Structures are given as C-alpha cells and as structure tokens.
Amino acid sequence: MAGMNINQAQQLLARLRNTYLAELPARCDDIEQLILALKQSNDGFEELYRLVHSTKGSAGTHSLQVVSVICHDIEDQLSRLDLSRGEVSAEVINLLLQFTDLIRQVVEQARQGVEDFAEFERELAELRYSLQKDRMLILMVEPSRHTRMLCQSALKSLPVQIGVVDDGFEALGMLLRTRYDLLVTAKEAKTLNAEGVIAAVRASDCINRHIRIVMMTSSQEVNIRRASDPDVVIQRSPQMGQQLNSVVVEMLEKAKSS
C-alpha cells in the first residue's frame, strides 16, 4: 500500500472485505456439501478440513473474528471424529450444519453493515453448551495448584467437565461468552478478585447472570447478604474437596429431578 494515504488504504481494505463477504456464501455452500457427503464417505474429510481452516484464517484477516471462532469450533468437532468407524452420525452432521448456518447469518448481517455480533456469540455459546448436555460444566478460578488438584480429585467420579484458570479477569471474559453450570472461585485471584467477578457477572446481561457460585476462602467472616455475593462459601481446609463434592452432587440430583 505504498503511496496510499490512510483514506485510500481504508477504502481498499473495505472493498477487499466486501468481496470476501460476497464470496463467503458460496464457500459455505461448499462446506455444507462436504459435510453432507460425510454421511456416505470420509473421502472429502481432508478437503473439508482445509476449506474450514482457510475460511478461519481469511475471516481473521477481514476482522470477522466471530466467523473465525465458529470455524475453530467446526475444526474442533472434525478433529474429534473417529474416521476409522467409516461413518459420521446424523447428530454430528446436524451439529456441523448448525455451525455453518451460523456463519451464513453472520455474513448476511455483516453485508448489511451491522457489526454487532453479540447475538451470534450467544447462539454459539448455547450451541457449545448443548454439546455437553450429559456433563455439568464448571469454571474454577484458583491460583493454588494444590487446591486445584484437591478439588479436581474430589469431583473426578462425577459427570463434570472442569475448566481451570487462575486469573479473575480471564474468568470474567469466559463467563461473558460461554455458558457454565457452576463457578467455583477463590476469594483472591490474579487481576480481579472473586467479589469483582461476581459483581460484574450479576450486573451483566450475559448467559451466566444467574449462575450458581461457590467461593473458597480462608476468611472466617464472609456473609451472604447481597445479590453480588456467592451462593455458597467453603472454608479452606482439608475437608473443602468433600464439601465441594456435596454441593455438586446436590446440583446434579436437582438437575435429574427437574
């Protein structure tokens, strides 16, 4: 872009992006056909993976991060397929088609000049959540490796999937984007403490606004009075793993009976 001024460069980038958006529906058609072909044969798997990967990269180039994220999820599902079985279930095919349809919706909105993709991000979060329908999704915010191992060991026999971070601000970002069933957090964490995370989540309009929250602390004086307080407080002790296990078991039993 040598010799161009800023306005000219921006106009060129806008034209390239518009061209990409105009071509993307046809690429979605190709992806869809390759997905449907998996019903009969795995012969087109490598071509499908390359096409999705290429779409992910080019979407990032044109500042369509939501498309990149969706493509990443498609790649993730493709990488989990057991091609040795020679067939792909209708459930997986349907899931891949839902991801592809979400890309189409994003493109349609982007071509209309609307750049707020929050609704699609929520749909994507719900789609991801549906993949874990048989497991409780737990986000754990804990800087202590020993405590993480203690809690994970206490829950290992239960149908749960645990994501672990040690940074409160990182956890907040995850909670705003991805649905979880339970937040287990240390009172003190890097960057943002539990009170800040809880207050921000409760005050937001995110999918985890009403999530059940367990806070682990060494303090003996923690009251649960405000809407921004945790639902359960567990004192740090050798028994904390068993206490957390009891909370999760209770939630699982309620989920079964509902």
Image (cartoon, rainbow, N blue to C red):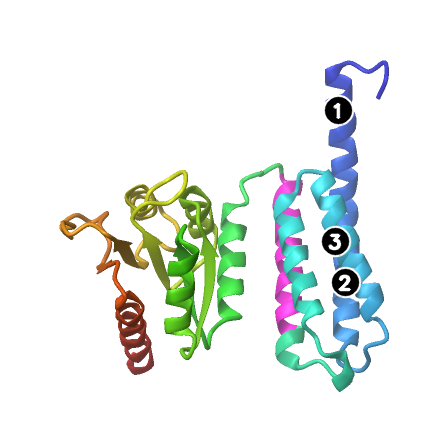
Q: In the rendered structure, find residue 227 and report the number of the disc placed on it.
A: none
Q: In the rendered structure, find residue 25 and report the number of the disc placed on it.
A: 3
Residue 105 counted in the magenta span: yes
Q: Amino acid at mark 2?
A: Ile
In terms of sequence position, does the residue under pointer 3 or pointer 2 come before the other? 3
Is 50 in front, or is 140?
Answer: 140
Q: Residue 79: x percent and y percent?
A: 71, 68
Residue 41 lies, with reference to residue 116, above or below; the image says below
Q: With 86 as the anchor, is 139 left or right in this view?
A: left
- Residue at (67% x, 82% y) in the render: 89
Q: Which residues are magenta?
A: 94-112
Q: Amino acid at mark 1?
A: Gln
Is 97 in front, or is 53?
Answer: 53
The Cα–Cα distance between marks 1 and 2, rounded to whole angstroms, is 30 Å
In terms of sequence position, does the residue under pointer 1 or pointer 2 come before the other? 1
- Residue at (48% x, 54% y) in the render: 122
Residue topped by disc 1: 11
Q: With 22 as the anchor, is 256 left or right in this view?
A: left
The Cα–Cα distance between marks 1 and 3, rounded to whole angstroms, is 23 Å
Question: Could you classify mark 2 by the number of other residues whose Cα lies within 10 Å: few (under 14), some (14-19), or many (20 or more)?
Answer: many
- Residue at (73% x, 16% y) in the render: 6
In terms of sequence position, does the residue under pointer 1 or pointer 3 come before the other? 1
